[in-house]
Amino acid sequence: MKKIEIKTTVLEYNSVDNFSEEEKILIQKSKEALKNAYAPYSNFRVSASVLLENGEIICGTNQENAAYPSGLCAERVAIFYANSLFPTVPVKALAVSVFAKNDFPESPTPPCGACRQVLVETETRFKNPIKIILIGKNIIRVIESAKSLLPLHFDDKFLD
């Protein structure tokens, strides 16, 4: 038997003061977009804002459906929308906000597995790491690459 240890580094901040102006705008847009979430069943509103290499910011929100599997997470809505509008422009960063039970959660909420896979695919497609910024009430967590969120990811190498 061989034991393999996988480590992920997460940076944790208590304020947006440590972020660039561009990232501060991305974080603010993520919070503002929460009002556009369609979450009548769970009341768990999620917003994701994508910062592209060309400076564009694209926002997406979760879209629920009475047939639950038919809905879509905010992260995938934002990534797919950005890739549709700017198919050749790499994603630089993604900020995720959540609003539930009439407040922001204390601890930031990470993307689900399906969203992590899409983020890894986007990184692989553009050969460019995506900085993930997870926003909580008083804590902001940063992961420097989506591959750090999904270290044993599936990619095109398995299809050869």
Image (cartoon, rainbow, N blue to C red):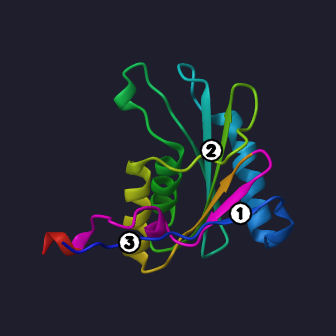
In the rendered structure, find residue 2 and report the number of the disc placed on it: none
Q: What is the CA distance from the residue labelled 2 to the residue labelled 1?
A: 20 Å
Q: Who's the residue at 61% across and 24% down the image? A: 43
Is residue 4 rendered magenta in the image? no
Identify the mark nearer the N-term, 3 or 2.
3
Which residue is at the far bottom? Answer: 127
Q: Nearer the viewer, residue 113 or 1?
A: 1
Q: Residues within 10 Å of mark 3 (few under 14, many from 20)?
A: few
Q: Nearer the viewer, mark 2 or mark 1?
A: 1
Identity, as a three-letter code, of the amino acid under mark 3: Glu
Q: Nearer the viewer, mark 1 or mark 3?
A: 3
**In the figure, is residue 126 to the left or right of 138?**
left
Which image quarter holds the C terminus? bottom left
Evaluate if marks 1 and 3 touch, with contact meaning CB atoms under 8 Å apart: no
Q: Position of residue 154 (x, y in %)?
A: 27, 64
SS type, badge 3 = loop
Mark 3, residue position: 5
Q: Is residue 87 visible?
A: no
Is residue 152 rendered magenta in the image? yes
Identity, as a three-letter code, of the amino acid under mark 2: Ser
Q: Position of residue 107 (x, y in %)?
A: 68, 46
Mark 1, residue position: 12
Is residue 100 shown above or below 118?
above
Mark 2, residue position: 47
